[in-house]
Image (cartoon, rainbow, N blue to C red):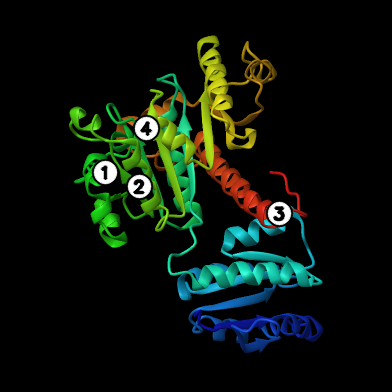
Amino acid sequence: MSENLNVIIIDKEENSRNIIKNYLSSFNNIEICAEFFDFELGFDFLRKAGKCIAFIDISENFEKALNLIKKLKDLNKEAHVVALSNKTSTDTIIKVMRAGAKEFVTKPVMESEFKEVINNLTQELNCVEPVQNCKIISTFSNKGGIGKTSIAVNLALELAQMSKEKVALIDLNLQLGDVSTFLDMTPPFAMDYIADNIHNLDEEELLKTLSKYKNTSLYVIADPLNIDKSQDITAEQIKSILNALKKTFSYIVIDIGTNIDTKTITALDNSDLILLIAIVNLPAIRSTQRCMELFEKLGYPADKIKLVLNRYMENEDIKTSDIEEVVKQKVYWKIPNNYLTMMSAINKGVPVSEINPEANIAINYKDFASKISDYLITQKLNKNYNKRELNI
């Protein structure tokens, strides 16, 4: 039997509060414990409320509401925020969801949409096993030497810095991985140990086997120290590791090797987003075309694949439109060619943002992480609300 859930309403409009209370009256397991028209009073109550659903009107005090929602991440992790607003621009929704809101409801509140949101949240809050909102992002190419690992490393760090949530970075180039080298880390445990012990580790123990990067929320699983150990890791173990990590992490970034085998296919199958990495030369473009053919055979939807051009320079002999025509895929993102900054970062074992946060490539990675985060949020919204089509 599910426990009663407390609801808190922060909305200056009395009519709006009454509508919400009327809709909530049809739920047996909901208890309205407080309502406020004043933002400050509502926030003071909410931060001490424990597990609850909080309806917060953000229509007029948008920036203030965003700050409140962000603070709740630290002050009351059990508060599930539903943002209410009569402003439904893509930018507004993205900012609110990125700040930490679980749902977004348009004002005036429609009963069908409202009840769907309540059902989703009560199911999540009452689950013995928490609903997994983790997103898995893989970097892939069947060609080496094009910067796939540097993209995985820098993207993972920016996602961690931006979201302030836990991000796992997995080196799935099991024989010749470089993720730990790029971050100047010597993890005490590697993929082979975790694979062998995954069914004996609880969430807390699993987290301890991962190596945390400096004072960030980025955690790393390195490739095996002994190359021979990589042969013993199975596709089933990789799937088990991903399922276990999804309970703790908001994002998992996988640097996948160039080999096409069952381990690679397992990682690709379980990815929400595949970043197909290419550079602008004919051999790389041909390899990218083959990857697209593979993805088609595997039955992956087109929006799961995002084509990323690395080391991009303006005025290339081969135009972006030419690449798109050959591989039959739009270019999603371009990472500029900044050889000096990138090589300095690699040689020092740090992300590019630690070399020069103002460099064009550092800013590009920050924007790239934001774009991916926004896209995944939009996918969630489109899935939850078919009538709302958002394009990022």
What SS does tag 1 mark?
A: helix
When the figure is inspected, residue 147 is found, relative to residue 67, above or below; the finding is above
Instruction: For marks 2 and 3, give the one nearer the viewer.
Output: 2
Outermost residue, front side: 1
Work out how far the residue at label 2 is from the one at label 3, CA to CA, in angstroms.
36 Å
Q: Disc number at residue 91?
A: 3
Dot 1 or dot 2, earlier in sequence: 1
When the figure is inspected, residue 152 is found, relative to residue 197, above or below; the finding is above
Work out how far the residue at label 4 is from the one at label 2, CA to CA, in angstroms.
12 Å
Work out how far the residue at label 1 is from the one at label 2, CA to CA, in angstroms.
8 Å
Question: Does the residue at mark 1 contact the one at mark 4 (Cβ under 8 Å)?
Answer: no
Question: Does the residue at mark 3 contact the one at mark 4 (Cβ under 8 Å)?
Answer: no
Find residue 157 and report its horizontal and vertical position in percent. Answer: 43, 46
Kind of residue sitting beneath label 1? Ala
Mark 1 highlights which residue? 195
Mark 2 highlights which residue? 240
Query: How busy is the neighbourhood of tag 1: few (under 14 within 10 Å), some, or many (20 plus)?
Result: some
